Image: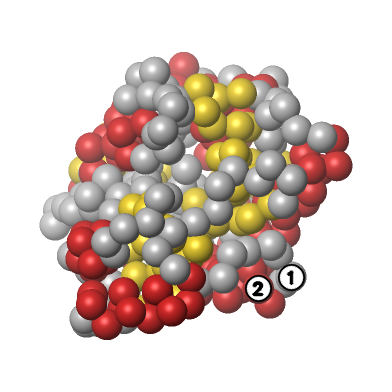
């Protein structure tokens, strides 16, 4: 059956341009799958346009706040429009790195130690505390941004005040972890309504020498290589998939998510974060993982739309 699907894109996020690329890819795949897709910019006219369009389902192809932090999800709930992805609570919890890590810790998942600083912290004071706890080989992250925006790995040590200011300038607080050397790994989770969630194949992300999976390497063609399945021992692969599933469930997510990890040379696993609306660009990891399971992109967006519709139908029964 054909459905009218509105694909939300853009907005005020620092990741708006990537969101628009994702949205165009999602819309094209939806059309291939037989649906009618309309692209809609997230702006002051969005509510009016959504009421005019009256879509069967909304597909938020949004990255970062306010599209991924529960704000848009709450807006869609008020409008009583079915949508793809996690709800208000899960989206908000996953977007805030400190809250997400506290959930992971309570569920016994493998995470790194951290320090969290509020938005108004003096960078010099924060640096002193970081040096006393971890030394100067750390990773500095804004609390509520995605796509590695504002993240600075200080792999070889050095000044911390400049990267602290970079992260703080994005608004919100800062999370700091000790630098962990290892392989960059990601695992998607597909959680369709009424079915058990399943972990997608484990992917290793390889970037050019002395680089990491930063914003540019995430979205530039050829910026990274995705190795599927990741060449890891079977028990490590199993553990990564178990942790990805456990993190997804602990945060109360639905439809899809993607967990990012570091795996050290001695196979120690460190869970970094979980993304509730992973990228849907031609170079994105979640579609690659689904493809490795035999789910091509048009089928993937189709089953996500149908999951959202089934969930909305089950709510209407109560």
Q: Quadrant of residue 117?
A: bottom left
Q: Quadrant of residue 267?
A: top right
Disc 2 and disc 1 in contact, CB within 8 angstroms: yes
Front residue (pair 13, 149)? 149
Q: Is residue 104 left or right of residue 38?
A: right
Front residue (pair 70, 208)? 208
Q: Is residue 55 left or right of residue 296?
A: left
Q: Residue at x 50, y 63 (%)?
A: 178
Q: Residues within 10 Å of mark 2 (few under 14, many from 20)?
A: few
Front residue (pair 46, 127)? 127
Q: How many marks?
A: 2
Q: Which mark is residue 105?
A: 2
Observer able to see residue 312: no
Quarter of the figure with the N terminus: top right
Describe the colour scheme in one phrase: secondary structure
Q: Is residue 42 left or right of residue 261?
A: left
Q: Residue at x 58, y 75 (%)?
A: 102
Q: CA distance from mark 2 to mark 1?
A: 5 Å
Front residue (pair 195, 2)? 195
SS type, badge 1: loop
Observer able to see residue 108: yes
In the orientation shown, which residue stands out farthest toward the left? 44
Q: Position of residue 252 (x, y in %)?
A: 62, 65
* Vertical side of 138 occupied by 256: above or below: above
Quarter of the figure with the C terminus: bottom right
Q: Position of residue 264 (x, y in %)?
A: 66, 46
Q: Which mark is residue 108?
A: 1
Q: Position of residue 275 (x, y in %)?
A: 50, 51
């Amino acid at each position: 059956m054909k459905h009218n699907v509105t694909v939300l894109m853009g907005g005020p996020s620092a990741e708006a341009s990537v969101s628009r690329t994702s949205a165009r890819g999602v819309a094209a795949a939806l059309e291939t799958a037989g649906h009618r897709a309309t692209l809609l910019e997230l702006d002051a006219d969005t509510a009016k346009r959504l009421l005019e369009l009256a879509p069967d389902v909304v597909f938020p192809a949004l990255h970062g706040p306010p599209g991924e932090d529960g704000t848009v999800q709450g807006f869609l709930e008020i409008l009583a429009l079915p949508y793809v992805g996690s709800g208000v609570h899960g989206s908000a919890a996953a977007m805030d790195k400190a809250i997400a890590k506290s959930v992971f810790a309570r569920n016994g998942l493998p995470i790194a130690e951290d320090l969290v600083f509020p938005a108004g912290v003096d960078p010099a004071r924060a640096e002193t505390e970081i040096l006393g706890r971890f030394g100067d080989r750390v990773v500095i992250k804004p609390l509520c941004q995605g796509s590695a925006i504002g993240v600075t790995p200080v792999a070889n040590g050095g000044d911390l005040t400049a990267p602290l200011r970079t992260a703080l300038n994005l608004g919100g607080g800062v999370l700091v972890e000790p630098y962990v050397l290892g392989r960059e790994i990601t695992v998607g989770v597909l959680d369709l309504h009424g079915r058990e969630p399943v972990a997608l194949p484990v992917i290793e992300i390889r970037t050019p020498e002395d680089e990491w999976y930063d914003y540019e390497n995430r979205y530039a063609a050829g910026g990274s290589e995705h190795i599927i399945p990741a060449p890891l021992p079977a028990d490590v692969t199993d553990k990564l998939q178990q942790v990805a599933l456990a993190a997804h469930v602990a945060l109360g997510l639905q439809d899809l998510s993607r967990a990012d990890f570091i795996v050290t040379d001695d196979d120690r696993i460190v869970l970094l974060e979980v993304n509730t609306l992973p990228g849907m660009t031609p170079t994105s990891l979640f579609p690659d993982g689904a493809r490795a399971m035999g789910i091509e992109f048009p089928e993937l967006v189709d089953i996500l739309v149908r999951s959202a519709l089934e969930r909305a139908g089950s709510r209407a029964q109560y």
